[in-house]
Amino acid sequence: MKKFVSTAALTAAVALTLAACGEAPDDSKESPSSPETSTGETTDTAADFKGCMVSDFGGFDDNSFNETSFAGLERAASELGIEMAKAESTDAGEYTSNVDSMVQAGCSLIFNVGFNLNDATFASASDNPEQHYALIDAALSDPNTFETVNFDNVKPILFNTQEAAFLAGYVAAGVTTTGTVATFGGQPYPSVTIFMDGFVDGVAKFNEDNGKSIKVLGWDKEKQTGSFTETFDEIGKGKELTEQFISQGADIIMPVAGPVGEGAMAAAKEHKDTYVIGVDTDAFAKYEQYQDILLTSVVKTLDTAVFDTIKATKDGDWDATPYVGTLENGGVGIAEFHNLDAKVPAEVKTKVEELKAQIIAGDLKVESPSATAVK
């Protein structure tokens, strides 16, 4: 069933729920107090540096932001010779213990992946002011007030994803043959709705430029309400919601729900001339079986951000100033059209490049309430 929710209210509710539902990890799982550790080729300076990462419950094989972030840590181990350790979370009750295990492991820098780890990061960073942390895909906020806070030992790694999603929305509007496209999220987190905001605005820009009335299902930017599966790991719910959109005429869908997006791909595969836009990483490289229905992807270079943050910190240049990925610095973008390149009209490709240049130059502003913390 399609669910319509208020982003602000549910974001607060989710944060409160996660803060209250911690429980001891299952003894059958790998103990978070004994994190997995490995070492790259070391140098004298690298041998003293240990980069660590805690996943959210999607795990490091989510074909999405956890996996891409971890690739940056692996690259640092390979190229910089640092030691690394990881703690994989399988449910919200493990966040605090997993972050604590990284502190106890003597990590030089701990990356916590995703909005869900905000509370555990806030608590651990408060208790360990000399420990360096990076919070990926979220600005640090006080769990009690939900206000954004700045800690000298926590570096937010953020992305102006609405800029790239705007371009994807324009492409979707230029390719649709039914006049209807759609988007949905896993949960109404800012790192999710920022995609949806940009997508809607991109479609609106296409309509404005071409005198069209392409419709977007699944998200009302003005009201900040829309469709969510309420999960990032139940693939079947993604397929179910996508089927609803297809029945309403949508032929291009952008799921912002991590692994649940595979459900959207499965649904699109069963319907002729129906396509999906991936998120976070280039889905074409991750889902070989769905390459013929993947139009493009809205990409965040989380791996590069992780690598660069490790290198700077290892070199003695720790800085808690937020990293913000943009179109200008290459932190966000859209992937190639791959097998569906012929489906994208030449004039749409040209216009997308023009719009990208305008955004980079500052002549076109793509706004999102979820981006206020990263401006």
Image (cartoon, rainbow, N blue to C red):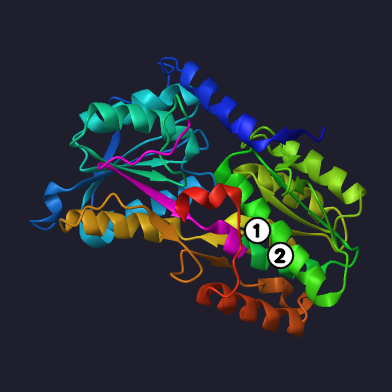
**Quadrant hosting residue 33:** top left
SS state under label 2: helix
Count of labels shown? 2
Residue ID at (69%, 58%)? 199
> Measured along the vertical axis of the image, is residue 90 above or below residue 174?
above
The circle on residue 202 is: 2
The circle on residue 1 is: none
Q: Is residue 17 left or right of residue 203?
A: left
Residue ID at (66%, 72%)? 338
> Measured along the vertical axis of the image, is residue 239 above or below residue 170?
above
Give x and y (percent) for residue 13. Answer: 59, 25
Tell whether position 147 is magenta.
yes
Q: Which residues are magenta?
A: 146-164
Residue ID at (46%, 42%)? 60
Which residue is the site of mark 1?
Answer: 198
| Residue 141 visible, this orientation | yes
User: Do callouts 2 and 1 mark residues in contact (Cβ within 8 Å)?
Assistant: yes
**Quadrant hosting residue 127:** top left
Is disc 1 surrounded by few (<14), some (14 to 19) or many (20+) residues within 10 Å?
Answer: many
SS state under label 1: helix
Give x and y (percent) for residue 334. Answer: 59, 67
Residue ID at (41%, 30%)? 142
**Quadrant hosting residue 10:** top right
Instruction: Name the one closer to the observer, 200 or 32.
Output: 200
Is disc 2 surrounded by few (<14), some (14 to 19) or many (20+) residues within 10 Å?
Answer: many
Three-letter amino acid code of the residue under disc 2: Gly
Q: In the rendered image, which quarter contains the N terminus?
A: top right
Give x and y (percent) for residue 219. Answer: 75, 47
Three-letter amino acid code of the residue under disc 1: Gly
